[in-house]
Amino acid sequence: AVLALNSIQSKPNLLLIYIVTALFAAVDGLQRPSMDAILPRLVGHAELPAASALMGLRAQFGVIIGPAIGGVIIAAFSVTTGFAVDIFSFVISLILLARVGSVPPAEHTEKPSLAAFLEGVRYAKSRQDLLGTYLIDLAAMFFAMPTALIPFWVDYLNAPWALGLLYAAVTIGALFTILTSSWMPRYKFHGRAIILAAIGWGLAIACAGLVHSLPFVFIFLVLAGASDEVSALFRQTIWNQTIPDQLRGRLAGINLLSYSVGPLAGQLRAASMASATSLTFSVTSGGIICIIAVILLALALPKLRHYNAETNEHAVAERAIRKARDENNP
């Protein structure tokens, strides 16, 4: 609403746009851990992989369709109309959320505090398989995140018209993975899938940097997005199937940090290296270093490498707890 009012001014306030954007990001930081924590309490243990894929579909669909609808509305009407439609969509969301019944807090849940957060960090460090999911994602994003270079990439390819196409490529790949994810609930070696998918991400990014043809760059970025989404879905499944309810919110906060810090630091690395060397070297070397880092982490974290959803002690324990809870609350 603030942005809508700002847009009707003869000289919209640029600083206000930055402030509202920062506030939106902060509020989203409160929402994301809550959504991640509530999903396993609403869905059965065996259905969590499919539920994670559905949540991923929601996110990726929004990334593609949202800006497209916004662009059409702005082009056909005005920026103010676009904001007005956005306000209406938020009102609908609030009405739907109000109809969702409250979920009681997990037993033995402590009040939020620094000590509680540190307990979550200690728990993550105590589990090699869980720690590995964070570290591999951070490595993949830090070394091989090319988003900041895309505007310069299209100029390098003499195709400035393809800016939106390359921005959408990773999301298109992720959407393809989600739409073909029916095999994932049957695959039990989640750690192995995360490792291989992260290597696939690095390999696709490295190949994208080596080629000098727009169609091939687009294809490799699509493959990178598909690989990254495989990793994301299996990471989410490990978190949902193995983390105790009383720790879920704290670890969702750590997860949010990894999601935000990794890509942002990765874009800084990519831009700095491209400035010091070249765009091709920055992208290609980043992908290669990503592969090396993931392989080293996989060798250092055998419990992640050998993770089996059917036999992992934490997954078995959580499955038993949720089965007992479901039997007591039919």
Image (cartoon, rainbow, N blue to C red):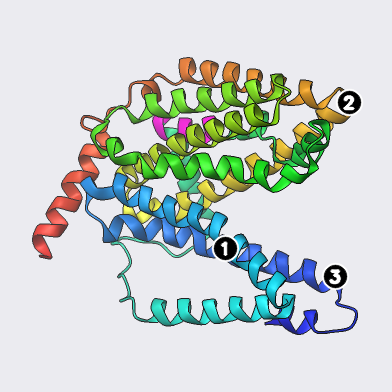
* Numbered range of the magenta stretch: 128-137
Query: In this rendering, would 301 be left or right of 202?
Result: left
Q: Earlier in the sequence, mark 1 or mark 2?
A: 1
Amino acid type of the residue that numbered disc 3 sits on in the rendered structure: Leu
Closer-to-camera residue (231/242): 231
**Spot occupied by residue 73 in the image (x, y as percentages of width and height):** 65, 72
Which residue corresponds to mark 1? 66
Residue 276 numbered mark, or none:
2
* Residue 60 covered by magenta stretch: no
- At horizontal 39% and vertical 52% (from top left) the residue drawn is 247
For marks 1 and 3, the one nearer the N-term is 3
For the N terminus, give its image quadrant.
bottom right
Tell me the number on the disc at residue 15: 3
The amino acid beneath tag 1 is Gly
- In the image shown, does 181 or 127 lie closer to the viewer? 181
Q: Quadrant of the C terminus?
A: bottom left
